[in-house]
Amino acid sequence: MANNVIDSIQMVDMDKEIKTSRILLDDYDGIERDLCIILVQGYFRNILNTTDPEMNSYGKQKAFVYAKWFTTRRLSSEQNGLHGLVERSKMYMLNDAQTTGWHHALEYEDVSELLASILEGKEGKNEAYDWKFIVEQLIPAAEKVGINPNEIMAASTNVKKMRGLVPAARQLIDKQEKEEVTLEEAEAILRSWIQKTMDPNVTYDGFREELNQWRGIILGRQEPILGYKMIMPNNKWAVYIETQSDKDLAIIEQALKNRVTLTITGFDYLQQAVLGTTEVFNSVSVIAKLEEEQKAALGKRCDNVNSASSS
């Protein structure tokens, strides 16, 4: 069957020479295709070398297909894929900055300022704050309980769990500083958590659920925070959650982190930006205005009657 995709990877590309340094140091049109070709080439040659370098065209075509499959897996795998490699490498470089202090020569105060200057937007600042906490507190804590930071960086799922640990770890440290838990208790809990970031049998979702349960127990809240989903007059959905404390608000903000941007505003925003756009609200506003005008007119007539009677 003919392949009509002009830029698809063909067998002839297995002999194409591509400078890997250009891919690592530059960004250009077609870089994605070149990266994929390099990976396919590597797997293709490895299959030939470990089987039969002189195999016939049918065998080479089959090896070519398997090379594409291995490449797709390499790019897609959360634990061993290239995306995970980037995350682990980022953690390595930030830890290197924290350890050697090279970022100070560029007038960055700490690693969060360094990363925030590279990333953009509020999400970037949140991520930078998380990484600052990891390299300044969690990694030293890991070393303290006998875990080599290089082992944490050995798998992307470890890094993902380490970042997921940040909110609970912050809360635990805060509790210890307030002497609500002892130093020994805090170290034992943190040691258990860090070890679970290393355990391949502990999934990210399971670990996150455990941390959430711990945070709920510490906060003394057994029941979920109550919220409402409302269908507005303009047929759009709105969510209303009334919190009982700042801790409840912190739970909600953490749960919505990297998904929803919460901006502090007054109640008038709900009236103007949401209800004010609907016909129903506008109609109510008009009626209220007419009522005010009627009251004003009635008051004026009463004043006229009183004036006439007094004269």
Image (cartoon, rainbow, N blue to C red):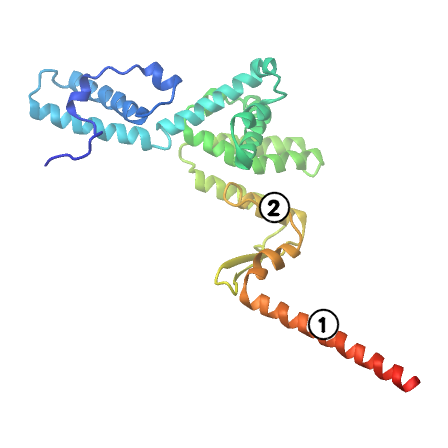
Q: Nearer the viewer, mark 1 or mark 2?
A: 1
Q: How many marks?
A: 2
- Which residue position holds label 1? 292
Which is nearer the eye, 106 or 253? 106
Query: Could you say where residue 187 lies in the image, as x and y percent from the top left?
Result: 60, 30
The kind of residue tagged 2 is: Thr
- Quadrant for the C terminus in the image: bottom right
- Could you classify mark 1 by the number of other residues whose Cα lies within 10 Å: few (under 14), some (14-19), or many (20 or more)? few
Query: Could you say where residue 282 lies in the image, as x and y percent from the top left?
Result: 59, 66
Quadrant of residue 137 in the image?
top right
Verify CB contact (< 8 Å) between mark 1 and mark 2. Answer: no
Which is nearer the eye, 79 or 188? 79
Q: Secondary structure at mark 2?
A: loop
Query: Could you say where residue 297 lies in the image, as x and y percent from the top left?
Result: 75, 76
The kind of residue tagged 1 is: Glu
Q: CA distance from mark 1 to mark 2?
A: 34 Å
Whether residue 252 appears in this view of the structure is yes
- Quadrant for the N terminus in the image: top left
Q: For this view, does 33 lie left or right of residue 50? A: right
Quadrant of residue 155 in the image?
top left
Of the numbered discs 1 and 2, the one sitting upstream in the chain is 2
Q: What residue do we see at 35% from left, 19% from top?
A: 23
- Which residue position holds label 2? 263
Residue that sits furthest to the bottom in the current view: 309
Quadrant of residue 188 in the image?
top right
Query: Could you say where residue 34 lies in the image, as x and y percent from the top left?
Result: 28, 22
The answer to whether residue 222 is above or below residue 31 is below
